[in-house]
């Protein structure tokens, strides 16, 4: 396709200064309005920009202050690294995340659109469902798993208050006990309450959920240090560097980036509501390098201190709180870490599939319905059975995760290099426009994805490539970006869309022509 396809036309006249009368310029195409197959209020460019610095910063706190975030830094010692090597790897990795996250964030802030609509640029207005559904599958699976993990804290609370309910933990229905089912359904239902007012309710939840965890972690670190005599060793037990210390170090860097790979794709779901690029940059700086490093250091200090206090390294903060001889400390810790798990679930696994599923059928599925569908699917798949299956977690979810790098590489290459950030936003919602390609699909983006996805999945899953498996996200992203650039750099339709977008941006607000 070259340029926007022809359609109905309008006749444009302009006053000619020499002839002193109106003259016909040329028949001009009338751009079609947004298609109901591509547009609804939730997918449309954001009008209300309420996610300022603090809301985005609190969002990062909710994402990082989770049980997974707590154990991540300590888990890197298993690669065979010492304390200072782990610290340097975390610093380098999180600064790479900061730079890459800004790419996604700036695109969302400028265009005001969520991830599946941004993907229409490169994959086509209908082809964007491919990257959207891949991201949705990953999110829904982890949505269910994180909901179940949060329900474990609820069980701890319930059994402390009503110990007689322990009898409800002995039976088994579809892999879970009666109390387990009840706890899971309670947490599952609580998350649906966040759908009441869409993203605005989520913003208010994130504003206090992330900081609440810092309060409990602060109390916990002081308690551990006091009982350890303010003297702990930060060298946690780990494994051996199977392929050398340098490989282990850069693997730790790569794993830090991969930990954030889901939000590298759909951070624009949040930054689209930011009032300025500066607010995105500032929130990312404080929320990622500063907050992530501080939380990692605190988690390592607490884990290291447990060895001196309890004679063993305890990696679960709920377990640590449970050893404190106080029912109130246990309840406070369990509630806080349940909230923390819900926080990361909402950020990483709830918002994305809500938009991704809405993108499939905008006329019938809005953000709320998309979130409800995702929640129902997460319930039906009985996530505890997924989590307890190494094959599912390592191969199915690991394989899907390896596909996220190629998607990021294609979309960012397309937006920043090929189009130089020039987009005809209205055409993202038209069936006939600059992003229609071939029946709504861009074959070049699909080819770039296939060429890069296959090696990325092989490197991530095949044991013989264990030495480079940690780098599969980077390898997939680099191959995808390079291939997409090589086969698309001379694409006439991209050049036409950039020219049109530049002209549209330069057009004065007051109309220069009259129509008849």
Image (cartoon, rainbow, N blue to C red):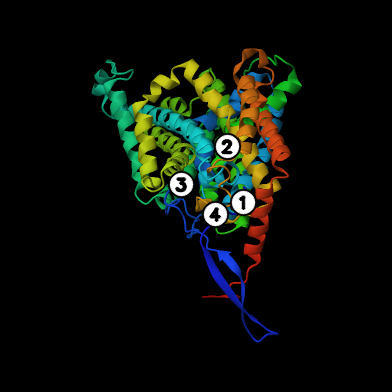
Instruction: Tell me what residue is drawn at x 70 percent, y 22 percent.
Output: 248
Q: Earlier in the sequence, mark 2 or mark 4?
A: 2
Q: Which residue was labeled with disc 1?
A: 106
* Circles 4, 3 touching at the beta carbon (< 8 Å): no
Q: Earlier in the sequence, mark 2 or mark 1?
A: 1
**Number of the label disc, if any, that sits on residue 427:** 4
* Circles 3, 1 touching at the beta carbon (< 8 Å): no
Can you tell which of label 2 and label 1 is closer to the viewer? 1
What is the CA distance from the residue labelled 2 to the residue labelled 3?
A: 17 Å
- In the figure, residue 209 lies in which quadrant? top left
What is the CA distance from the residue labelled 4 to the residue labelled 1?
A: 20 Å
Instruction: Tell me what residue is drawn at x 28 percent, y 28 percent.
Output: 182
Q: Which residue was labeled with disc 3?
A: 206
Residue 92 placed where, x, y %?
A: 70, 35
Instruction: Tell me what residue is drawn at x 62 percent, y 20 percent.
Output: 458
Q: Earlier in the sequence, mark 4 or mark 1?
A: 1
Residue 420 placed where, x, y %?
A: 69, 51
Q: Secondary structure at mark 2?
A: helix
* Circles 2, 3 touching at the beta carbon (< 8 Å): no
Q: Residues within 10 Å of mark 1 (few under 14, many from 20)?
A: many
Can you tell which of label 2 and label 3 is closer to the viewer? 3
**Number of the label disc, if any, that sits on residue 453:** none
Q: Is residue 87 visible?
A: no
Residue 148 placed where, x, y %?
A: 39, 28
Report the number of discs: 4
Q: Secondary structure at mark 3?
A: helix
Q: Is residue 302 visible?
A: yes
């Amino acid at each position: 396709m070259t340029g926007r396809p022809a359609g109905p036309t309008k006749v444009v006249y302009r006053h000619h200064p020499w002839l002193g009368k109106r003259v016909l310029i040329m028949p001009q195409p009338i751009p079609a309005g947004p298609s109901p197959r591509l547009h609804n209020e939730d997918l449309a460019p954001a009008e209300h920009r309420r996610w300022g610095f603090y809301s985005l910063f609190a969002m990062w706190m909710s994402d990082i202050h989770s049980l997974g975030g707590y154990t991540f830094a300590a888990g890197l010692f298993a690669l065979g690294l010492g304390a200072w090597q782990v610290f340097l790897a975390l610093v380098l990795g999180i600064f790479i995340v900061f730079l890459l996250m800004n790419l996604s964030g700036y695109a969302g802030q400028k265009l005001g659109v969520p991830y599946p609509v941004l993907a229409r640029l490169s994959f086509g207005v209908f082809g964007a469902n491919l990257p959207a559904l891949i991201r949705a599958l990953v999110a829904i699976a982890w949505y269910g798993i994180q909901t179940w993990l949060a329900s474990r804290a609820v069980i701890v609370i319930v059994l402390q208050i009503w110990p007689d309910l322990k009898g409800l933990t002995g039976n088994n229905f579809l892999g879970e006990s009666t109390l387990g089912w009840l706890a899971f359904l309670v947490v599952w239902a609580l998350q649906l309450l966040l759908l009441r007012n869409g993203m605005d309710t989520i913003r208010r939840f994130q504003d206090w959920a992330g900081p609440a965890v810092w309060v409990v972690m602060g109390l916990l670190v002081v308690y551990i240090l006091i009982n350890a005599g303010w003297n702990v060793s930060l060298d946690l037990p780990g494994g051996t560097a199977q392929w050398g210390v340098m490989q282990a170090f850069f693997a730790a860097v790569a794993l830090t980036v991969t930990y954030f790979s889901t939000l590298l794709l759909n951070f624009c779901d949040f930054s689209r509501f930011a009032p300025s690029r500066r607010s995105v940059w500032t929130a990312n700086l404080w929320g990622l390098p500063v907050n992530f490093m501080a939380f990692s250091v605190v988690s390592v200090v607490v884990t290291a201190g447990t060895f001196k206090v309890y004679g063993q390294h305890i990696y679960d903060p709920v377990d640590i709180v449970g050893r404190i001889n106080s029912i109130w400390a246990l309840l406070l810790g369990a509630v806080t870490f349940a909230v923390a798990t819900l926080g990361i679930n909402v950020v990483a696994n709830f918002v994305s599939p809500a938009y991704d599923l809405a993108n499939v059928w905008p006329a019938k599925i809005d953000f709320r319905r998309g979130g409800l569908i995702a929640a129902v699917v997460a319930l039906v798949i009985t996530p505890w059975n997924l989590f307890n299956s190494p094959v599912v977690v390592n191969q199915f979810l690991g394989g899907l995760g390896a596909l996220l790098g190629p998607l990021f590489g294609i979309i960012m290459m397309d937006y920043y290099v090929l189009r130089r950030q020039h987009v005809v936003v209205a055409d993202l919602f038209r069936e006939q426009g600059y992003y229609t390609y071939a029946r709504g699909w861009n074959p070049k983006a699909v080819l770039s994805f296939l060429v890069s996805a296959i090696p990325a999945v092989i490197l991530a899953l095949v044991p013989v490539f264990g030495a480079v498996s940690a780098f599969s996200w980077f390898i997939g992203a680099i191959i995808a970006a390079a291939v997409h650039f090589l086969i698309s750099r001379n694409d006439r339709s991209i050049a036409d869309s950039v020219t049109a977008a530049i002209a549209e941006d330069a057009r004065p607000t007051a109309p220069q022509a009259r129509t008849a």
